[in-house]
Every structure is written in structure tokens, then in C-alpha cells.
């Protein structure tokens, strides 16, 4: 996922041109080891938010004010499906258009974080437990 600040939500999918429309999206995460399926599929082990990376001073786009039209994404995914044969999790979340039909989003600042365990019960390395389009951290 990547976009620039102020990207119209409707540019993600034509169905989002309608006020209050909702569209689900999937993001795939590939793990470098076999994970505990129950841990990965537990949506409470995942969080979705806005990156506040210290590489931007802990601020959104070096202190630029977040537009009033910027949408918020629910802090937990709708679902997560794990495929152990390819060590891949598909995280499903939704984006909702605002009531004016002019919502914006900066996908490069969406942060996905996972706090689960592998098949041996080992916790995720805290330096590698998140991904954002801005940081490219995996």
C-alpha cells in the first residue's frame, strides 16, 4: 500500500465515491517462520493505526496537520486468515467514505502491528512486529 497525503478515498475504488460507502481491503503478510494459526487469526493480536515514526519526528508528515477529511480505520481488522502452508496471513479491514463524499487517506501512514507467537510460542521481535507503507519496516 502506498499513496500520497490527501489521496481521495474514492480513488481506491469507485464504490467509495458514494457518501458513507464501505469497502473491504486485504493486505497479505508473509512470515519468515511457521506461526501459531490461532495466534495469527486472533484479531485482537493485530492493530491498525497511523504511524508516528520517529523518522518524521513522531509527527504526521513532519508536522503537517492531518486534514479534517482524513478517514480513520478501525483499530482492529475485520478478520485474519492464516495459511500455514505458505506462512501468509491475509488481514481484512474496511475503509468508510465520509458523509460528504470527499474523504481522504494517506495509505503510506497506515501501520499494521502484530503481537502473536510462532508455533514454538516465541513472541514477535518488537523491532519487526509492524509494517507501514511509509517506513517499509517489516
Image (spheres, rainbow, N blue to C red):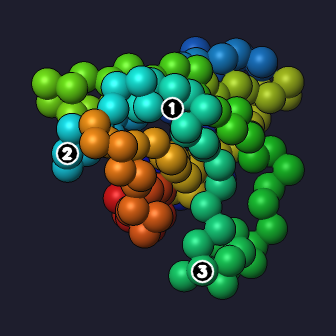
Marks 1 and 3 in Cβ contact (< 8 Å): no
| Structural distance between the alpha carbons of marks 1 and 2 | 32 Å
Direction from residue 99 to residue 57 in the image, left or right:
left
Mark sitting earlier along the chain (1/2): 1
Q: Which quadrant, please, contains the C terminus? A: bottom left
Residues at marks 3 and 2, CA–CA distance in whole angstroms:
28 Å
Is the C-beta separation of discs 3 and 2 under 8 Å? no
Judge by depth and name the residue closer to the eye, 24 or 48. 48
- Relative to 18, does residue 53 appear above or below in the rendering? below
| Tag shown at residue 33 | 2
> Which residue is the site of mark 3?
54
Say which element carries label 1. loop
**Residue at left offset 41%, top offset 52%:** 123
Of the numbered discs 3 and 2, the one sitting upstream in the chain is: 2
Q: How many angstroms separate mark 1 from mark 3 (CA)? A: 28 Å
Which one is in front in this view, the residue at disc 1 or the one at disc 2? 2
Residue 48: give x, y in percent of width and height.
Answer: 60, 43
Q: Give coordinates of residue 136: x percent, y percent.
A: 37, 63
Q: Mark 1 points at which residue?
A: 12
Position of residue 110 measured from the top left corner of the image (x, y, whole percent): 57, 50
Question: Which one is in front, 59 or 46?
Answer: 46
Instruction: Name the secondary structure under disc 3.
Output: helix
Would residue 46 appear left or right of 29 to someone viewing this image? right
> Which residue is depicted at the point 78% across and 60% down?
66
Q: From the viewer's perspective, is residue 32 above or below residue 75?
A: below
Point out the tag, 1 or 3, that comes first from the N-terminus: 1
Amino acid at each position: 500500500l502506498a499513496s500520497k497525503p490527501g489521496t481521495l478515498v474514492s480513488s481506491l475504488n469507485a464504490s467509495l465515491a458514494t457518501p458513507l460507502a464501505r469497502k473491504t481491503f486485504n493486505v497479505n503478510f508473509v512470515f519468515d517462520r511457521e506461526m501459531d494459526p490461532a495466534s495469527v487469526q486472533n484479531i485482537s493480536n493485530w492493530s491498525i493505526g497511523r504511524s508516528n515514526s520517529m523518522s518524521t519526528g513522531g509527527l504526521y508528515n513532519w508536522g503537517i496537520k492531518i486534514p479534517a477529511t482524513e478517514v480513520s480505520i478501525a483499530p482492529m481488522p475485520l478478520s485474519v486468515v492464516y495459511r500455514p502452508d505458505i506462512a501468509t496471513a491475509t488481514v481484512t479491514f474496511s475503509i468508510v467514505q465520509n458523509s460528504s463524499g470527499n474523504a481522504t487517506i494517506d495509505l503510506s501512514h497506515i501501520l499494521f502491528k502484530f503481537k502473536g507467537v510462532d508455533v514454538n510460542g516465541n513472541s514477535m521481535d518488537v523491532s519487526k512486529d509492524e509494517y507501514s507503507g511509509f517506513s517499509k519496516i517489516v
